Amino acid sequence: TRLFSSPASPAKILDNDVGVGYRGTGEDWSYAKSSERPDRPLTNAQLKTLTAKSNARGFSQLMLQYAQIGIGAAAIASSEATGGVVGAAARALGTALMGFGLVTMGHCAQHECIHNTAFASRRLNELVAWAVSLPRLTNPRWERMLHKDHHTWTNDPERDPEIMPGGNPMPSDAKSYAQKVLRVGGGKFGLGVWSARVAILLSGARGHVVGYSGFDPVPAAKAAHVRDGLARSCRLQLAFYALLLGAVGAAGAWGELAKYWLLPVLVGEPMHAFFHIADHLNCEPDYEDGKSNTRTTLAPRFVSFNLWNMNYHAEHHLYPSIPFHQLPAAHAALRGHFTRVSPSAFDLHRQLLGRWMPYFQQRLATGGPEAVGTGWVPCTPDRP
């Protein structure tokens, strides 16, 4: 692995290999070396402690989340024998527990693994990333490809693949807000993220690399870096689903499939989106300003646990090589450094609906698409 060896930037050894976008092979993926980023204030000594990975912490987090999913499944199973109001309540609680666990694991555990920070072992990160991605129909190799560009060009309306082509993660009206939170509607056939995920898997298995919509081709130069490995991964994933559906069909267990997988995931997606939507809303469209282009949203411990501490998102974007279990400590070390911090997800949605979306609509009406794209200026102050 290539290490930066400039005597002017000894901290580079801790970053391993800072590449630009998809060319990066380490965990940082910044647009520049740490020594060239004035928005990164931590010392080498602090980074040495905060970037320490742990297989034990990764396993304990993973097993506890699987335990939560198991408790949810047990509640669903017991609800049938209980019946009545108590049974209905147990079924609803179990579905929510199971769904929130499956979806946050599928997104947040996968996310940590594609950064190679969930575990100290790179092989463990790869295996777990693939396994936890199965319930949500996502693929970690594909996610890692575009996520690198997201970290390099964070919130840049022209280069961040997570907000293109609209150029702004802000919901523009009540309909787009509902679609972002509920994860349904929009996209191909009105199926939102689901049609995109299926299209990504099918295209990837055929060697066609597409972007977030599932139907927009990724430039050939970039696709060449991932095509073969992505094709193998997608084919293996599709084979798993085929075997699963065959076994379910043979057992006549379609009801159980819906009860213990499909319905919990459909319920868990909006629960996760309620928190995940916050990450870059009303933030500066400047990839060089890690203090203002990403938002941290404080949350109860149960929520932070399920999110693998990804609610400390500004800290994660500023230092992607810090593993999930060290993010609360990074939050304490960087207190006062960030301009976009929400005290809760409920407060964020209150600001979003009451101030930021009307502000977005006003700018769109007076300045056109450019005013909410490349000319975007966040609503200030962030909170009154």
Image: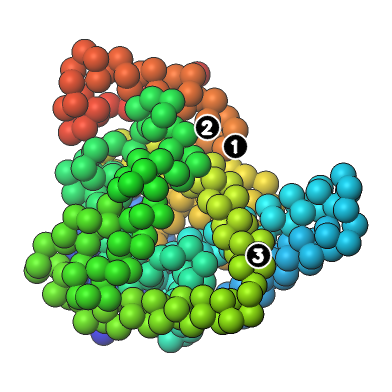
Residue 286: x percent and y percent?
25, 41
Q: CA distance from mark 2 to mark 3?
A: 37 Å
Of pointers 2 and 3, the one earlier in the residue sequence: 3
Q: Amino acid at mark 2?
A: Leu
Q: CA distance from mark 1 to mark 3?
A: 37 Å
Q: Nearer the viewer, mark 1 or mark 3?
A: 3
Q: Which numbered circle lies on residue 255?
A: 3
Q: Is residue 164 left or right of residue 304?
A: left
Above-or-below relation of 1 to 339: below
SS of the residue under disc 1: loop
Residue at 51 percent across and 55 percent down: it is 310
Q: Amino acid at mark 3?
A: Gly
Q: Which residue is mark 2?
A: 348
SS of the residue under disc 3: helix
The crowding category of the residue bearing disc 3, from other C-alpha atoms within 10 Å (few below 14, some 14 to 19, many at least 20), is few
Give whichever of 351, 381 is nearer the camera: 351
Residue at 27 percent across and 76 percent down: it is 205
Of pointers 1 and 3, the one earlier in the residue sequence: 3
SS of the residue under disc 2: helix
Residue 64: x percent and y percent?
69, 70
Q: Is residue 129 left or right of residue 195?
A: right
Give whichever of 255, 318 is nearer the camera: 255
Q: Amino acid at mark 1?
A: Ser
Q: Which residue is mark 1?
A: 344
Q: CA distance from mark 2 to mark 1?
A: 6 Å
